[in-house]
Image (cartoon, rainbow, N blue to C red):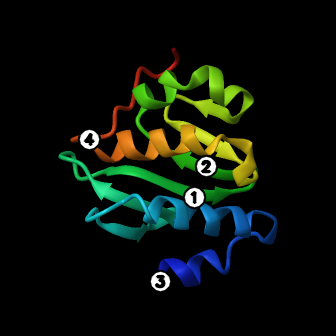
Amino acid sequence: MTIKKHLATVAEKYRETAQQLHAFISKRSGKHAVELRSGGVVAYGIGSDDFMLLGFAVRSAGVTLYASADVLMDHADELGKNKTGVTCLRLRKMADVDTKVLNDIVRRSLKKKQMNYGTCGS
């Protein structure tokens, strides 16, 4: 299944956000590989550990963006209630996060050799 077809089948209340996020990241992903992985994760870039550098999936509570923990922590104050975990940022709509902040998260995450998973439980 293509990413476009997959995004057309996700929960309607988050479909537009997922499609907008995919377009936003795709414009900034350059030569990085983009693929649909198991669990409906749209993955961008492959790190030295063979895991994605950045990705997202539509979940029951919104669109979850997976990014490097250190990058998300650098924006913790700006992300506020949207940050839900060490490497997770939940969006219900694109307006939930400032475009400049999102751009920095995408750009810096895709420059890494592998995703920084942070310390669990901290």
14 or 117: nearer the viewer? 14
Mark linked to residue 39: none
In the picture, measured across the screen, residue 49 lies left or right of residue 70, that is: left
Mark linked to residue 64: 2
87 or 110: nearer the viewer? 110
Q: Amino acid at mark 4?
A: Gln
Q: CA distance from mark 3 to mark 2?
A: 19 Å
Which numbered disc flags the more N-terminal residue, 3 or 2? 3
Q: Is residue 17 above or below residue 105?
A: below
Q: Is residue 16 above or below residue 46?
A: below
Q: Residue at x 33, y 47 (%)?
A: 110
Q: Is residue 77 above or below residue 66?
A: above
* Count of residue discs: 4
Q: CA distance from mark 3 to mark 1?
A: 14 Å
- Asked whether the residues under the numbered discs 1 and 2 touch, taking CB atoms below 8 Å apart as contact, a structural biologist would say yes
- Asked whether the residues under the numbered discs 3 and 2 touch, taking CB atoms below 8 Å apart as contact, a structural biologist would say no
Q: Residue at x 54, y 65 (%)?
A: 22
Which numbered disc flags the more N-terminal residue, 3 or 4? 3
- Asked whether the residues under the numbered discs 3 and 1 touch, taking CB atoms below 8 Å apart as contact, a structural biologist would say no
Q: Residue at x 38, y 32 (%)?
A: 117
**Residue at which label 4 appears:** 114
Which numbered disc flags the more N-terminal residue, 3 or 1? 3
Q: Position of residue 36 (x, y in %)?
A: 43, 70
In the picture, measured across the screen, residue 6 lies left or right of residue 9, that is: left
- Asked whether the residues under the numbered discs 2 and 4 touch, taking CB atoms below 8 Å apart as contact, a structural biologist would say no
In the picture, measured across the screen, residue 77 lies left or right of residue 24, that is: right
122 or 100: nearer the viewer? 100
Local SS, label 2: strand
Mark linked to residue 2: 3
Mark linked to residue 57: 1
Q: Residues within 10 Å of mark 2 (few under 14, many from 20)?
A: many
Residue 13: name its quadrant: bottom right
